[in-house]
Image (spheres, helix red, strand yellow):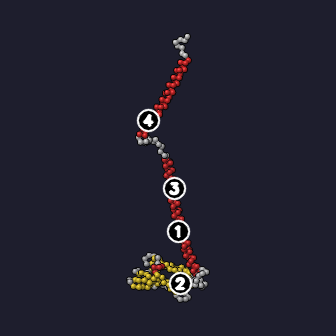
């Protein structure tokens, strides 16, 4: 017979089971309390308009901002360089086109006198351009030419006279008037096919030109004259 202090094995097992159950309940209770605190904090944040506390989101490092700024500056500089290079290329192409057009004009001009199909043309002023400088000073650019009919050179002098009005009267200025006595016998030329001549002259104050005449006086042969409308040759 067992005494009053004797404990059966089934009673001990039942006590251990009850202790384990209490520990588990305490563990899960702590987890539930932690979840409740987290949910309560999240609800507080949401009730404040979804704004997180200052410092909740990490700000980009200053080094990253400087890197982006440098990359932007580099891209802008590259764009400027590309634009400048493109503009220079366009200018070069335009200059080349103008040069090609000039060469074509020169070639066509040369063929008129030295080409196989050149026709016999006497000595004369083929081209004349006038450009105004300061005041009443004008610069002329003339082309004296002839065909390839003769192999000998032609020499002589070129001069101009200008017709117009002054003080309401028709007036004609001789080369000595235009040059004020300097080189009054004209500009010398010597050519086989053609020659470009340039120089300047001065018109009197108040003189309005209407026509200019080029006069060639060769060493051999008769003088040759050709008139041009002033507005047609003046620039």
Q: CA distance from mark 1 to mark 3?
A: 29 Å
Distance between the Cα atoms at labels 1 and 4?
A: 76 Å
Between disc 1 and disc 2, the foreground one is: 1
Q: Nearer the viewer, mark 4 or mark 3?
A: 4
Q: Earlier in the sequence, mark 4 or mark 3?
A: 4
Left or right of 148, for residue 179: left
Decide which of tag 1 and tag 3 comes sooner along the chain.
3
The residue tagged 4 is 40
Do residues under tags 4 and 3 come within 8 Å of each other at their CB atoms? no
Up the image or down, 118 lies above or below 94; here it is: below
* Marked residue nearer the N-terminal end (4 or 2): 4
Q: Earlier in the sequence, mark 1 or mark 2?
A: 1
Count neighbours of disc 1 (C-alpha within 10 A) and say few if under 14, some if 14 to 19, many if 20 or more: few
The CA span between labels 3 and 2 is 62 Å
Helix, strand, or loop for circle 1? Answer: helix
Residue matched to label 3:
75
Disc 2: which residue: 124
- Answer yes or no: do the residues labelled 1 and 3 have beta carbons within 8 Å? no
Q: Earlier in the sequence, mark 3 or mark 2?
A: 3
Q: Position of residue 155 (x, y in %)?
A: 55, 84
Mark 3 near mark 2, Cβ–Cβ under 8 Å?
no
Which one is nearer the viewer's eye here, 208 or 183? 208
Q: For the residue labelled by badge 4, is the local secondary structure a helix, a strand or a loop?
A: helix
**Nearer to us: label 1 or label 4:** 4
């Amino acid at each position: 017979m067992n005494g009053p202090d004797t404990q059966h094995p089934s009673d001990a097992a039942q006590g251990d089971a009850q202790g384990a159950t209490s520990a588990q309940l305490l563990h899960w209770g702590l987890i539930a309390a932690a979840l409740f605190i987290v949910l309560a904090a999240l609800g507080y944040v949401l009730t404040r308009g979804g704004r997180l506390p200052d410092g909740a989101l990490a700000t980009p490092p200053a080094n990253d901002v400087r890197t982006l700024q440098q990359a932007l500056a580099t891209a802008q500089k590259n764009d400027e360089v590309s634009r400048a290079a493109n503009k220079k290329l366009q200018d070069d192409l335009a200059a080349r086109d103008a040069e090609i057009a000039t060469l074509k004009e020169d070639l066509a001009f040369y063929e008129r006198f030295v080409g196989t199909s050149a026709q016999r043309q006497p000595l004369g002023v083929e081209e004349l351009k006038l450009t105004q400088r300061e005041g009443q000073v004008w610069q002329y650019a003339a082309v004296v030419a002839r065909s390839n009919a003769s192999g000998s050179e032609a020499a002589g002098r070129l001069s101009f006279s200008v017709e117009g009005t002054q003080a309401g009267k028709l007036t004609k200025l001789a080369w000595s008037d235009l040059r004020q006595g300097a080189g009054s016998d004209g500009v010398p030329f010597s050519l086989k096919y053609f020659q470009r001549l340039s120089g300047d002259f001065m018109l009197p104050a108040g003189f309005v030109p209407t026509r200019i005449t080029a006069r060639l006086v060769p060493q051999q042969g008769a003088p040759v004259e050709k008139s041009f409308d002033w507005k047609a040759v003046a620039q």
